[in-house]
Image (cartoon, helix red, strand yellow):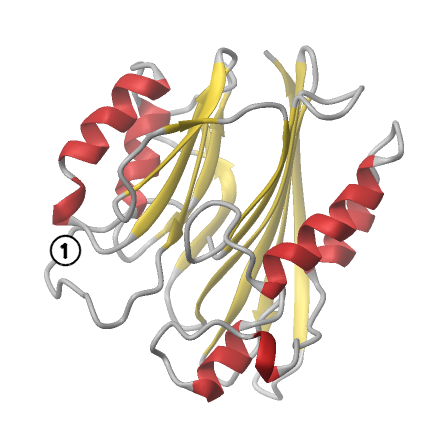
């Protein structure tokens, strides 16, 4: 994941609303959203190169998502895949607090990440680029490739637009997908300097990213109500001509 917008205990109809974009190289093999054969209670897409995932939920309402922390100057060439941090939580039974404490203890093995993990008792966030594990209070949050609520243009714009969508008692998934599809670039003066150079800062700055080799591969929306979960994923496929087509999958179940 490279952008997560999260409303927690902040809407009359849903205890959690998550809208997120996964950005990745176009040639990295990926399985779309579905229940896993070896863990039928886990609903997630899958990175077919390393076996992990970027976002998932279980039939019991455990949810987990990850973003990379952009820091090209500090990279471990043989680091384990961060996607397994999400998969292991979803397949496990530990509380989010205990799991994230163990993740923090092993955090130096991995390249930079932010990890969200939660269940019906609460949502928590940790990073191997920060000291504390944060318990989320009711509110609206944005997470990209820096720490939680770092005011990057895409995070600030995403939160402003999502707040308008949240003003309605009923959440329209198409409105959230439209938000996640925003390709407008902010001015150079607003861009962060993360060490990738100005051209890549521009490419990575919109909510929806598109370039020759790298871009937004999928958009996801998770709605958790009192007793029901709806998970919708829209995957994007880049044609040889460079145009994008998409496929949408939706799963709904009680828990």
Q: Is residue 51 left or right of residue 30?
A: left
Q: Left or right of 230: which side holds 145?
A: left
- The one nearer the camera, 157 or 121, is 157
The answer to whether residue 221 is seen in the rendering is yes
Which residue is at 39% across, 85% downward? 197
Residue 239 in view of the camera: no
**Residue under the image location 74 percent in, 56 percent down:** 179
Q: SS class of the residue under badge 1?
A: loop
Residue at which label 1 appears? 79
Q: Residues within 10 Å of mark 1 (few under 14, many from 20)?
A: few
Residue 66 drawn above or below residue 71: above
Q: Position of residue 46 (x, y in %)?
A: 40, 47
* Quarter of the rendering containing residue 241: bottom right
Q: Give x and y (percent) for residue 59.
A: 51, 18
Compare residues 159 and 172 and report the one nearer the observer: 159
Q: How many numbered marks are there?
A: 1
Q: Quadrant of the C terminus?
A: top right
At x 51%, y 26%, the residue is 136
Along the line of sight, the residue nearer the viewer: 182 or 147: 147
Which image quadrant is residue 66 in? top left
In the displayed orientation, state which residue is furthest to the front. 189
Q: Position of residue 1 (x, y in %)?
A: 46, 53
In this rendering, is residue 197 above or below 209? below
Q: Report x, y in % for residue 165.
A: 83, 42
Identify the residue at horizontal 61%, vertical 62% (top origin).
Answer: 154
Where 121 sits versus 65, above or below? above
């Amino acid at each position: 994941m490279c952008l997560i917008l999260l409303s927690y205990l902040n809407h009359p109809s849903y205890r959690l609303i998550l809208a997120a974009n996964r950005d990745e190289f176009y040639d990295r093999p990926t399985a779309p959203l579905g229940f896993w054969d070896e863990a039928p209670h886990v609903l997630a897409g899958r990175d077919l190169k390393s076996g992990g995932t970027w976002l998932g939920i279980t039939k019991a309402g455990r949810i987990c998502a990850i973003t990379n922390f952009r820091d090209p100057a500090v990279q471990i060439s043989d680091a384990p895949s961060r996607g397994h941090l999400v998969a292991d939580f979803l397949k496990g039974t530990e509380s989010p607090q205990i799991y994230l404490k163990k993740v923090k203890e092993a955090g130096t093995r991995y390249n930079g990440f932010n990890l969200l993990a939660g269940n019906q008792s609460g949502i928590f966030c940790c990073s191997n680029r920060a000291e504390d594990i944060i318990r989320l209070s009711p509110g609206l949050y944005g997470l990209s490739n820096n720490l939680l609520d770092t005011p990057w243009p895409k995070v600030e714009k995403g939160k402003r637009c999502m707040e308008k969508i949240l003003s309605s008692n009923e959440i329209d998934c198409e409105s959230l997908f439209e938000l996640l599809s925003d390709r407008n670039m902010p001015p150079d003066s607003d861009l962060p300097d993360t060490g990738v150079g100005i051209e890549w800062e521009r490419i990575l700055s919109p909510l929806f990213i598109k370039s020759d080799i790298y871009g937004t591969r999928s958009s996801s929306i998770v709605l958790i109500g009192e007793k029901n979960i709806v998970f919708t994923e829209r995957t994007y496929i880049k044609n040889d001509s460079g145009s994008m087509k998409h496929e949408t999958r939706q799963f709904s179940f009680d828990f």
